[in-house]
Amino acid sequence: MSTLMQRVGEIGLVPVIKLESARKAVGLGRALVAGGIPVAEVTFRTAAAEEAIRAMAAELPELLVGAGTVLTVDQAERALAAGAKFIVSPCYVDEVVAYCQERGIPVLPGVVNPDGVAKGLAQGLDVLKFFPAGPAGGTAMLDAMAGPFGSARFVPTGGIDASNVSSYARRTNVHAIGGTWMVRPDLVEAEDWQAVEGLCREAVFALHDFSFAHLGISGQDEAECRAVAGRFQQLFNFAPTEGGASIFAGDRVEITRTPCPGAKGHLAIRCNQVERAVAYFKRAGIQARPETAKGAPGRLKAIYLDLELAGFAVHLLGR
């Protein structure tokens, strides 16, 4: 997988943009960056697409600009000449795929069934656009394809918005998610960049779907761990559940058998995908603690952040 596609996966969202005027491109791009989604797929559905890509690429180097709805080699040539860094098609166009592969340009052809997935994998593609995602079966179809196509990753687009993005984001074969809900045409037309930025921020939080999982209390040893768990049961009837490194009192309090990170303990925060959340916090200047990671690369189950809130360390857990 290319470094650029890895970055797209870490961001996790790909706004799909239709611009009638290239004059609005830079303002929109700035709103995307400020809102935490430094990616733009500018579709070749209007005459302004080429100039819009050129403006974004020239003025916003921090923005990953790609071209969407690319159906011909001519469009791909023009998009790349304007500064596009990746190419997206709504269907499988052999000539466009070959053209991009010859030049080392990431290309995401659209597929909708196992035949398309098999074709893409045979041609060396590891990330494919799944379009139209909703009408083609949505998350159920992605789950069905995960078995026979374990190495394939998808960018589902079509029929996705703030209400269902989280259900897509928790799938391990979903690389990123394309959509238009954070770049509503009426807001773009009105150049209401503050509103677009706000929708982008909401989309980012919907993507991760952070939620409180449990409170961790640091026990100093086995005896203290059992004593504290026993008191929770005696006082509140929180039934103890034995674990390898801890005992849970009910389902929201964990007492560790040995000291855990954090002066007072830890706060466990659930998220859709741990690695994507780690990348999100890294962009905010907060690093993860790799020595605390649990799970295999690409399938992280848990990790601590190098962060304390009121003396509590933050522990990310995957769904």
Image (cartoon, rainbow, N blue to C red):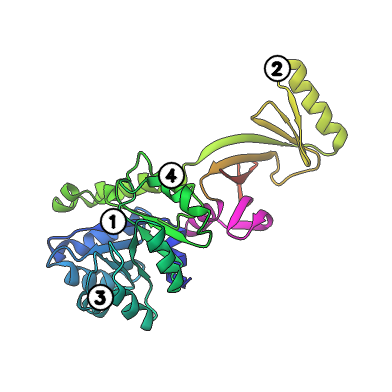
Q: Is 303 in front, or is 33? A: 303
Residue located farthest toward the bottom when viewing the structure as drawn? 102
Does label 3 or label 1 sit earlier along the sequence? Answer: 1
CA separation in Å, label 2 and label 3: 65 Å
Residue 103 in view, yes or no: no
Q: Nearer the viewer, mark 4 or mark 3?
A: 4
Among the 4 quarters of the image, the one containing residue 111: bottom left
CA separation in Å, label 4 and label 2: 41 Å
Does label 2 or label 1 sit earlier along the sequence? Answer: 1
Q: Is the residue 86 above or below the residue 27 in the image?
A: below
Q: What residue would you read off at disc 4?
A: 140
CA separation in Å, label 4 and label 3: 32 Å
Q: Which mark is residue 76?
A: 3
User: Looking at the picture, which amino acid does disc 2 mark?
Assistant: Phe
Q: Which residues are magenta?
A: 274-303
Q: Nearer the viewer, mark 4 or mark 2?
A: 4
Among the 4 quarters of the image, the one containing residue 219: top right
Q: What residue would you read off at disc 2?
A: 236
Q: Nearer the viewer, mark 2 or mark 3?
A: 3
Where residue 129 sits: x, y (%)? Answer: 36, 60
